[in-house]
Structure formats: structure tokens, C-alpha cells
């Protein structure tokens, strides 16, 4: 009755007989005792939802970044805000549709197979060869729906973008804004390849990755300013709405990283860590004058 390997299982056939050992169907996971494929009915953990939220945030941030950079505007205008809103709607609708198309279909309730180890993301590498003979192929989605749902989200995001974003780009900023679509046609396939290859690694390190990248991007935002004095950095942030929105966006990502790391297991203590979100920006503003290359003599 037992099956070799970590993921090979048996399915119950229509005549109540058991099949040969093989991969479990999508949404099923083998029972470690009987080695029979059973339907996954676990609720996703908070960490799983945070990971899915991270994927959505990455997509939204990349869209907004390329819209802002390629528009070559240094302030928010009606045209820019419309394009940002379009990207936001695309991403949110794609996320909701991805959940609706997951089991059970048509409901925002999602059943999942719990992640037990990093090997669950790479079942392709664990096909057994009993007695070093014929290999049994048992590749499956052991982390349902964290693997295929993200592919579905990326695909829906691209389709929704191509449906109506070109019409908006034609009406608003026809020359510059179309480049944001070309950029998305590059970075979405890149995200798909990254998820296919190292999705499991991202699952375990995305909280720290979010925290680190938010600090680096915040520093890079201030570093491009020509005037690095304290007064100029503060005034340019408070007076220009674009700079203020970008800074608040960095703070939101930083807070998301803190919540992902702590998962608010101890709410009073871990929620207080969010008060430290502005600290990297404050440290940069206070210490920028000490890192001026002109002050160093070689």
C-alpha cells in the first residue's frame, strides 16, 4: 500500500480500487499514513496570505514605477493619476479573479495544502527511482494553491492590461505612457520565470526581502536629490506631493515587511515596531551631509 518517495500517492478509482503510485491530482495531497491522495481542506495561514499579498504588491509597485519613470514628469498630473489608477484596478481585479478561480471556484474561500518544507515547492526534484530502476514521476503542486494561482494572477494581469490600458495610453500621454506597457511585457514574464525557479525561496525570505528593499529604495529616492542638505531634503518631501507619496509608499512597504516577519503574534509589542517605520528616512536625512564625497580627501 505504501508508495516510494515523498509525494507519490494512490488515488481511489471509480470501482473503489486503488491506482498505481503516481502524482496526486491538483488540490490533493497524499496522506502520510495510508499514502492515499486526499483533498486539501486546510485554510491558508496568515503567512500564506501575506505571501500572496507580497506578489500583488510587487506587481503594483513595478507598474507604478515604470509609469512614473517613463512619463518623465516630476509632478502628479491628471494623466499620470489616471494611468496609476488603471494599473491599480488591473492588479486588484486580477487578484480577485485569481481567488475566485481557485478551489472552491466562485468563492473567496480558499482551500490549501499546508507547506511543510521547502521541498514541497520542488516536487520535480524528488521523483523516486525504486531500486535504482525505473523512475516514478510524481511531480505535483504540493503547496496548492500558492504555486499555480500566482501564475494565474500574472496571466490575468497581463490580459487585463492589454485589454484597456492601450486605449488609455492613446488618450493620455500617447508618446510616453505606451512605454510602460512595453516594460510590463518584459517584467511580467521575468516574474513568471522567477516564481517558477525560486518561488519556494521567495516564500521563506519575502518578509526580510521586503524590509531590505524598502530601506534601499527609500535611500535611493533621497540619494538622487542634488541638494543633500537637511533643509532641502525635508522641504522637497513636504512641499512636493509626488515625493511625499513616494515616501509614504516606502513606509507602507516597510510596515508590510515588519508585519510579515512578526505576523503580529504578540500584537501590542509587534504593532509598536511599526512606529519605527520612519526611522530609515530620518537617519538618512540626518547623516546625508556626512557622506558627501566632496568631504573625503584621497
Image: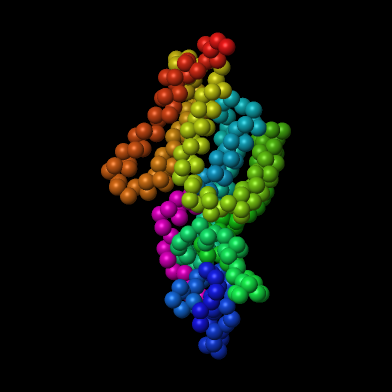
Drawn side of residue 167 relative to residue 9, left or right: right
Residue farthest right in this picture? 175
Number of on-image labels: 0
Q: Is residue 164 visible?
A: no
**Residue 158 rendering spot, x and y as whole percentages:** 64, 50
- Residue occupying the point 65% across, 74% down: 133
Residue farthest front in this picture? 131
Q: Is residue 47 magenta?
A: yes
Against 193, residue 137 (above or below) is below
**Residue 171 rendering spot, x and y as whole percentages:** 68, 37
Q: Nearer the viewer, residue 15 or 124?
A: 124
Drawn side of residue 177 relative to residue 7, left or right: right
Against 116, residue 229 (above or below) is above
Against 16, residue 70 (above or below) is above
Colour scheme shown = rainbow
Q: Can residue 287 be seen in this view?
A: yes
Q: Is residue 206 magenta?
A: no
Q: Which of 13 and 291 is in front in this view?
A: 291
Q: In which quarter of the image is the C terminus?
A: top right
In the image, the segment drawn in magenta is 37-53
**Residue 185 rendering spot, x and y as whole percentages:** 68, 45
- Residue occupying the point 53% across, 82% down: 12
- Residue occupying the point 49% across, 46% down: 206
Residue farthest bottom in this picture? 15
- Residue occupying the point 58% across, 29% down: 77
**Residue 195 rendering spot, x and y as whole percentages:** 59, 52
Against 124, residue 77 (above or below) is above
Drawn side of residue 109 relative to residue 136, left or right: left
Amino acid at each position: 500500500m505504501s508508495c516510494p518517495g515523498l509525494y507519490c500517492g494512490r488515488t481511489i478509482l471509480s470501482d473503489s480500487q486503488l491506482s498505481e503510485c503516481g502524482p496526486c491530482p491538483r488540490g490533493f495531497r497524499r496522506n502520510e499514513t495510508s499514502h492515499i491522495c486526499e483533498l486539501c481542506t486546510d485554510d491558508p495561514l496568515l503567512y500564506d496570505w501575506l505571501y500572496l499579498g507580497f506578489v500583488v504588491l510587487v506587481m503594483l509597485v513595478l507598474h507604478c514605477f515604470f509609469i512614473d519613470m517613463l512619463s518623465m514628469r516630476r509632478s502628479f498630473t491628471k494623466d499620470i493619476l489616471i494611468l496609476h489608477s488603471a494599473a491599480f484596478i488591473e492588479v486588484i481585479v486580477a487578484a480577485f479573479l485569481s481567488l475566485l478561480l481557485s478551489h472552491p471556484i466562485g468563492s473567496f474561500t480558499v482551500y490549501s495544502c499546508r507547506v511543510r518544507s521547502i521541498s514541497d515547492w520542488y516536487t520535480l526534484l524528488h521523483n523516486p527511482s525504486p531500486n535504482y530502476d525505473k523512475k516514478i514521476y510524481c511531480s505535483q503542486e504540493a503547496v496548492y494553491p500558492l504555486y499555480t494561482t500566482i501564475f494565474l494572477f500574472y496571466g490575468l494581469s497581463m490580459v487585463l492590461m492589454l485589454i484597456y490600458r492601450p486605449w488609455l495610453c492613446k488618450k493620455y500621454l500617447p508618446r510616453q505612457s505606451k512605454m510602460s506597457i512595453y516594460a510590463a511585457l518584459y517584467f511580467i514574464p521575468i516574474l513568471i520565470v522567477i516564481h517558477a525557479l525560486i518561488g519556494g525561496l521567495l516564500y521563506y525570505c519575502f518578509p526580510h526581502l521586503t524590509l531590505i528593499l524598502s530601506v534601499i529604495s527609500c535611500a535611493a529616492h533621497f540619494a538622487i536629490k542634488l541638494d543633500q542638505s537637511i533643509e532641502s531634503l525635508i522641504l522637497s518631501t513636504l512641499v512636493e506631493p509626488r515625493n511625499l507619496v513616494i515616501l509614504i509608499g516606502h513606509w507602507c512597504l516597510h510596515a508590510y515587511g515588519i508585519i510579515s516577519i512578526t505576523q503580529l503574534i504578540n500584537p501590542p509589542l509587534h504593532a509598536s515596531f511599526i512606529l519605527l517605520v520612519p526611522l530609515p528616512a530620518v537617519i538618512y536625512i540626518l547623516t546625508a551631509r556626512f557622506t558627501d564625497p566632496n568631504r573625503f580627501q584621497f
